[in-house]
Amino acid sequence: MSSSLLCGRPSLLKLRRITAAMRSCCSSLTCGRQTVNGVDLYYEKAGSGNHAVLLLPGALGSTKTDFQPQLKSLNQDLFTVVGWDPRGYGQSRPPDRDFPLDFFERDARDAVDLMRILGFAKFSLLGWSDGGITALIAAAKNPESINKTLVWGSNAFVSQKDLDIYNSVRDVSRWSARMRAPMEAVYGAQVFAKTWQAWVDGIAQFARRPKGNICIDLLPLIRCPTLIVHGEKDPMVPSCHPHFLLKHIQGSRLHLMPEGKHNLHLRFPEEFNKLVEDFLQEGQKD
Ligand code: TYC
C-alpha cells in the first residue's frame, strides 16, 4: 500500500480506498492527525519497537520532505518512529506559520505534548537543523521524558556569518529548481517564497540578542546521551556550531561525516540510519 494512499486529508472516496487497501495488505506506515495545544498536527508512524523516536524536520520541513528514508528503513522491530509536521508546516496547516521570538520553544512544547498524547511517556529525539534546535530545547526542558537526543546541522546561536548565509538564501527564486521543487510541491510557489522569507526574518531576530542566543542557556540542562552529527561539507551551518554544542552539552559526542553536506541523512541514508541505530541501542537492556 502506498503511503500517499494512507496519508493526507482523506475524502470519502479516499477513505473507501484506504479501507479496501488495508484489507489486502498491512503497511507498517500509518498517519494521523492529533489536536495539540489548539492546533491540528499531522504525523506519520512506522514500526512497533519498544524504543519510541520522534523525527523533527528542518525549517518549513515536513515528514514527507525530510524523513522518508528514516521512516522507511530504521529498524521497525526495535523502534517506533514518529515523524511530525510542526504547526504551520507541511500538512499541519492551517494555521499559517509565524515566527515569534519563542517559535522554537513553541515547537518543542508541541512536539513533547504530541508524543505524550500518542502514548509515549519516554522517547528519543532525532532533529535536523531547526528541528535539532527544537530537540535540544525539548531535551533540556523535559529531562524525564527524553531518552536520547541526536541532532545534525543545528546551531544554538546566530552569528554575523550565519546572518550573511541566511540573507544569501533569502530569495528562493535564486535557488535551483531542484532545491525548490520539494518545498513548492508542499506549499505552492508563492506561499513557499513568502514563508521562507518570514523564516529568515524569524531566525535573524536572534542575532539581535546578546551572543545571538537561541538556546545557549539551556544546553547545560541537557542530561540525556546526546550525539551531534555534522557534515564537513555543510555550506549552511559553519563547523563552529557543532563544536559549540559539543562543548556545552555535558557528555555529548561529535560524529563528523567527511562527505556530508546539510542533507546528509537524505544523501547517505544507509550510513546515517546505521549511526542512529547504533547510538540509540547503546547501553539499552532490551
Ligand atoms: N536551519 C535551516 C533548516 O532548518 C537550514 C539553513 C541553515 C538554512 C542555514 C539557511 O543559512 C541557512 N533546514
Image (tube, rainbow, N blue to C red):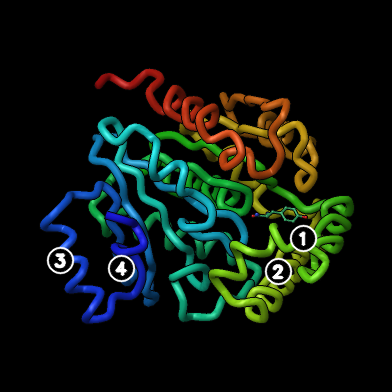
Give the residue number, with chain letter if any, for mark 2: 202
Q: Mark 4 = which residue?
A: 34
4 or 2: tag closer to the N-terminus: 4
Q: Position of residue 126 (x, y in %)?
A: 49, 42
Cα distance between the residues tagged 4 and 3: 20 Å
Task: Indicate the amino acid at tag 3.
Answer: Thr
Q: Picture coordinates of residue 195 (x, y %)? A: 66, 75
Viewer can see residue 187: yes
Nearer to us of marks 4 and 2 is 4
Which badge, 2 or 3, is on the more N-terminal residue?
Answer: 3
Q: Which residue is drawn at 47% across and 26% down?
A: 274
Q: Residue furthest left?
A: 23
Q: How many marks?
A: 4
Sequence order check: which comes first, mark 2 or mark 1?
1
Compared with residue 258, is residue 71 higher up or lower down, i.e. above or below? Answer: below
Label 4 sits on a secondary structure element that is: strand
Looking at the image, residue 142 sits to the left or right of residue 195; the answer is left
Question: Considering depth in this image, is 219 or 116 the residue closer to the camera?
Answer: 116
Rendered view: 50 above or below 137: above
In front of the other: 165 or 66: 66
**Ligand 1's quadrant:** bottom right
Q: Which marked residue is nearer to the observer: mark 4 or mark 1?
A: 1
In percent of width and height, residue 71 lies at 40, 45
Residue 80 falls left or right of residue 210: left
Q: Mark 1, residues whose alpha carbon is within 10 Å: few (<14), some, or many (≥20)? A: few
Q: Name the residue under label 1.
A: 176
SS for tag 1?
loop
Q: Which of marks 2 and 3 is in front?
A: 3
Label for residue 19? 3
